[in-house]
Amino acid sequence: NTIEFTGTLHATIVKQVHLKNPSKKTLAYNAILVGRDAVDFSFPKENAVTIPPGRQGFVTVEFTIRFLRPAEAVLILISNKVDGIDGATLAFSLKSEVKNIEPLGMIKCRSPCYEL
């Protein structure tokens, strides 16, 4: 699965990965980021989530678009054994795309176009 972070240059985009626990036991995951641009992605809250039986949980990932080139990383959710059960390891591809560029400011200056 791919999670896309699209927006304006210098914008901060926040996405949530929703996780469901259909089992009758509690699941727990630790999230890590790996890859070429992993340092540009972060977890604004915790990088761990515990999901009670039959419930949902989520991991929040934040990204600030700093460059015009697409950023790429992988979000890996590694299960922690809780109640004697291990969940499956999950991986998501993270990609960014700049959709718009807005100036941060304007500078006015006067200069002759041509002088002999």
Image: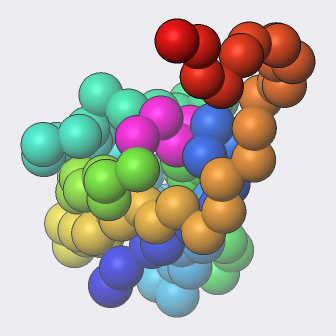
Residue 108, above or below 24: above
Magenta stretch encompasses residue 80: no
In magenta, the rendered stretch is: 63-67
In this rendered view, identify the residue nearer to me: 94 or 16: 94
In the picture, measured across the screen, residue 106 lies left or right of residue 79, that is right
Coordinates of residue 42 in the picture (x, y in percent): 46, 33
Query: Residue at the front extreme?
Result: 116
In this rendered view, identify the residue nearer to me: 94 or 97: 97
According to the image, what is the colour scheme of the structure?
Answer: rainbow
Q: Residue at 66% across / 53% down in the picture?
A: 101
In the picture, measured across the screen, residue 56 lies left or right of residue 96, that is right
**Residue 80 in sight here:** no
Residue 30, above or below 112: below
Magenta stretch encompasses residue 64: yes
In the picture, measured across the screen, residue 68 lies left or right of residue 69, that is right
Secondary structure mostly seen in the magenta stretch: loop
In this rendered view, identify the residue nearer to me: 103 or 116: 116
Coordinates of residue 74 in the picture (x, y in percent): 23, 57
Coordinates of residue 50 in the picture (x, y in percent): 54, 49
Q: Quadrant where the N terminus lies?
A: bottom left
Q: How many marks?
A: 0
**Residue 60 in sight here:** yes
Q: Residue at 24% across / 53% down in the picture?
A: 73
In this rendered view, identify the residue nearer to me: 55 or 108: 108
Coordinates of residue 45 in the picture (x, y in percent): 64, 29
Q: Residue at 13% across / 45% down in the picture?
A: 35
**Could you say which quadrant of the image residue 12 lies in?**
top right
Q: Residue at 46% across / 66% down in the picture?
A: 97
